[in-house]
Image (cartoon, rainbow, N blue to C red):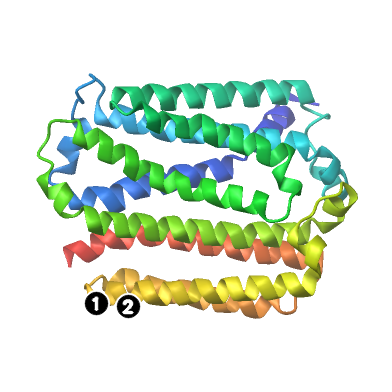
Amino acid sequence: MNKFSILKDYFRLFRFGNLLFIILIQFLTLFCIIFPFINEPQLVFQTTLNSGVTFSTAFILLVLATTLIAAGGNIINDVYDVEIDSINRPEKIIIGKSIKSGTAIGIAIALDVIGSLLGIWMSIRVDFWLAGLIFPMCALGLWFYASTYKKSLLIGNLIISLFCCISILIVWLFVYLMLLRSGLDFVLLLHHSKTIHYFVWCFSGFAFLTTLIREIIKDCEDINGDTFVGCRTIPIVYGFFSTKNILFWLTFFFIFILAIAQWFLFKNDWSILGYCGFIIQFFLLRFTSKMQNTNSKEEFHQLSNRMKLIMLLGVLSMISIPVDLLI
């Protein structure tokens, strides 16, 4: 096997597409949800905190810590999924072929330790060390997910959905703490904190629900391998028909929640973001329509990709927030 093939396998192992998505989410959360409500955000970005670390450096370390832990989770998930993948997608197995299992585990441990230490160090720098516990807890959560909870009914789905939710919430938590301890005028940010809270929680909820729906779809796609190793996922326990009903009502609930959010948006003159909600609702309705006739592994894979597109559209809709402020 040539070096290019091995390098390609490492890229697949890390799942760089997923990592870039996390980076995109965290940067858009800062620049499109938080910074539009701060006076002279470029000055804030260059500000040196009381700890001697610049705001920009602290934020980049936050993104790096989150990304490293996510990468470690991706790797350890592949290690524990070898038996399942040997049935579901044997042509895509990397662990045990081009990359040894021991090597993969060593890399995952290193990434999780470095990510956790960065998070803890940064939390100490902003004088709130308890926040640093989030990072090792997420790392451990992803390990337990891969080794145990992935095979349990719903618990594994909720862990991954919660991690995606936290990747947004943690940006606001640390930015709030960093600004609070920066010595800058904090009055304007406090004045707009309710609005920032609203947007952060809305997009966190969006990330949670889209991830939960997609994880259930992936369980439908992987039912053969999951059944072989004794998993108790929703489609295995309740069957395809009941699972599709669960997905239908989850999607319907999602559309309903979006409608409530849109009412608030239009009421408070956030019209562009409100119209973005209509686009997402249209794709959710198309998703629901397509789901009714989905039965094969390939069709569930296509359905999973549709939900991934909806996730991307939702994240990109953050860009409309500073545009709405300018109008």
Provide the residue designation for mark 1: 267
Q: Position of residue 123 (x, y in %)?
A: 35, 27
Mark 2–mark 1 Cα distance, whole angstroms, equals: 6 Å
Label 1 environment density (alpha carbons within 10 Å; few <14, some 14–19, many ≥20): few
Q: Position of residue 181 (x, y in %)?
A: 20, 31
Provide the residue designation for mark 2: 263
* Residue 70 figure quarter: top right
Helix, strand, or loop for circle 1?
helix
Residue at 38% x, 57% y: name it.
201
Front-most of 15 and 67? 67
Q: Position of residue 317 (x, y in %)?
A: 38, 62
* Contact between labelled residues 1 and 2, with CB atoms less than 8 Å apart: yes
Q: Quadrant of the C terminus?
A: bottom left
Q: Quadrant of the N terminus?
A: top right
Label annotation for residue 140:
none
Helix, strand, or loop for circle 2?
helix
Residue at 49% x, 26% y: name it.
116
Residue at 83% x, 30% y: name it.
97
Question: Can you see residue 256?
Answer: yes
In the image, taking residue 47 as reference, residue 146 lies left or right, namely right
The extreme front residue here reads 130
Q: Position of residue 213 (x, y in %)?
A: 61, 63
Q: Amino acid at mark 2?
A: Trp
- Against 239, is 315 above or below? above
Front-most of 27 and 227? 227
- Against 287, is 120 above or below? above
Question: Can you see residue 275?
Answer: no
Q: Amino acid at mark 1?
A: Lys
